[in-house]
Amino acid sequence: MKIFPTNNYCFKLVGEPTESLERLKRRTLISESLSSKITDKSFIGIISDNNFRLISSEIGRGAFCVLTGEIINKSGVVKIEINKPFQILSAILLCLPIAGFIFQLFSQAVHLFLLFLIVALGQLLIIRFLFIGIAFKRLSKNSLNRLTDVLDIESLEKK
């Protein structure tokens, strides 16, 4: 089980790759830091040659997923992953049930050990699959739809 989910996609462009990259450059606020800013562009990030590293420009939700990709001829690949600051915050959130379990272990009777273990594992699973998993699924889909619109992608398939 991976703690932080990632998605990999292959895509084919409708037009020429140079036109698609120019369109992506016009719709991207060039910035080294992948953090949300108020802008009228679709993305924030870095585009160099045929490579890009982008976040969606949606305030509050756009920085959760990072799109890293490369365009080769009329096809390309894109990897969607959780941004590093959100990975750190999620890791801290995942440590809380473990810390609570350890605290309860030393402060309560030993006969409740199994109950506390089950509760801590349940909390870990809820945080990972409900909070992180659903947020990643929804926000990565939104970012991918924006990228599909900007690059004018003909077909998209998951690796």
Image (cartoon, rainbow, N blue to C red):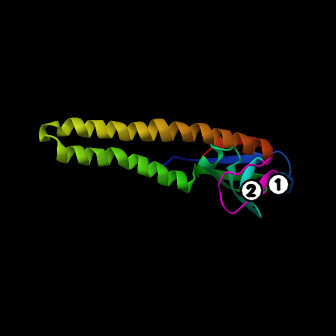
Residue drawn at 34 percent across, 36 percent down: 122
Above-or-below relation of 25 to 103: below
Q: Secondary structure at mark 2?
A: strand
Residue 12 on the magenta segment: no
> Where is residue 12 shown, x and y percent of the image?
75, 47
Neighbourhood count class around disc 2 (C-alpha, 10 Å): few under 14, some 14–19, many 20 upward: many
25 magenta-colored: yes
Residue 97 is situated, as x and y percent measured from the top left of the image, at: 33, 44
- Residue hosting label 1: 17
Q: Would you say 105 lies left or right of 66 here?
A: left
Q: Which portion, as a residue range, is magenta?
A: 24-41
Q: Position of residue 86 (x, y in %)?
A: 53, 51
Using residue 66 as the reference point, say whether residue 90 is left or right of it.
left
Q: Position of residue 23 (x, y in %)?
A: 84, 51
Q: Nearer the viewer, residue 60 or 41?
A: 60
| Tag 1 secondary structure | helix
Which mark, residue 71?
2
Q: Residue at (47%, 48%) from the top-left corner?
A: 90
Q: Residue at x 30, y 40 (%)?
A: 120
Magenta stretch, main secondary structure class = loop
Q: Nearer the viewer, residue 91 or 73?
A: 91
The span from disc 1 to disc 2 (Cα, nearest Å) is 7 Å
| Residue at 42% across, 47% down | 93
Residues at circles 1 and 2 in contact by the CB criterion of under 8 Å: yes
